[in-house]
Image (cartoon, rainbow, N blue to C red):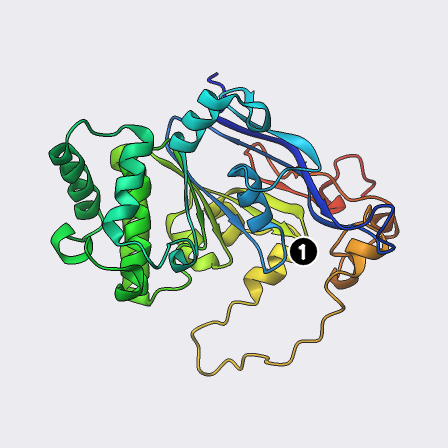
Amino acid sequence: MAEPILQIKSATKTFGGGFLDPNPPLVALKDFNLDIYEEPARITTIAGESGSGKTTLANAILGFLPLTSGQILYKGIDIYSMNRQQRLAYRKEVQAIFQDPYEVYNPFWRVQHIFDLVVRRFGLAQTKQEARDAVEDALNLVGLRGDEILEKHPHQLSGGQRQRVMVARAYMLRPRLIVADEPVSAVDASLRAMILDIMLRLRDEHRISFLYITHDLSTAYQIGDEMVILFQGITAEMGQTTQIVENPKHPYVQELIASIPAPNPRRKWATEIKLPPEDVMRFGNPNSCRFYPRCPHRMEHCLNAQPPLYKIDTTDHEAACFLYDPQASR
């Protein structure tokens, strides 16, 4: 069997704590594991509510945030121990699309400069004409034209145009993996459908895999092949997207799916929901199940240990809940 192109092994990230901080550390991500293969190209969704650790994971993969423990390997090499040449190759082959590209654009630069930087940094063209052709090809993929936007500044573009420029810039490098952090949450419905369609085309026609980070289960269901659902830094459930959405197993995921309002005017949607403090288990007892205060199936030993991922059946569907412990007495 082929080796994964990207391996995430027991990735853990904590903030705070230590000798000079009297507060207990916040575990943003704990013992996260994931393998992404180059072939076939896939869209793997990392889903969860705000504060679940999604963006922490993305920043760690992109090398912006060092892990407290664990490893991230690209083609078998730890990304934090790469030499200059290996890191440059990694930067080229693993690209990013952010939620709001306006925050990463320099407002003094024209759009043309964004592409010029990529061409020069990675040596994508030998002549100005080759560079212009490469830029036009990338812009055409996302439904834009160079003569309409290249001389403009970022603030002169709409949010959808800025997002598509970021997709085009990433595509120019022909990456093997794109980390897309909430790429459609800041655009309207029509542009959301367009960007999701572009992602599918990049997967199917150009064999580019995606790590799609979102809180929107509807778009995850629409384009995702596999899904990992995080809850307070812990992997609650993982498997095929259709399995998780249509037949959730973890109590948190079941609650999450059930909270989606049905399009039925006769069915009243409860608007008042009382929940315990979100981080009570993160700080109070970090080694116990994080969902314990809200779980309808909680057991005494859920307070003693965080349940590992248990296989649900013969597929890759797994859930971190003692309900699926094969050794538990029935």
Query: How many other residues sit within 10 Å of disc 1, few (<14), some (14-19) or many (≥20)?
Result: many
Residue at 14% in and 57% down: 148
Where is residue 252? Give x, y as percent.
Answer: 65, 57
Q: Nearer the viewer, residue 9 or 20?
A: 20
Residue at point 55%, 28% (across, down): 79
Across the whole image, how many numbered discs are drawn on residues? 1
Q: Is residue 58 above or below residue 190?
A: above
Residue at the (71%, 75%) spot, across then down: 274
Can I make out residue 298 in this image? no
What residue sits 58% from the left and 52% below the top?
Answer: 248
Query: Label 1 belongs to which residue?
Result: 251
| Farthest top residue in view | 1
Which x, y percent locates residue 37?
Answer: 45, 27
Residue 197 left/right relative to 65: left
Give the residue type that dot 1 points to: Pro
Image quadrant occupied by the C terminus: top right
Q: Quadrant of residue 95?
A: top left
Q: Residue furthest front?
A: 108
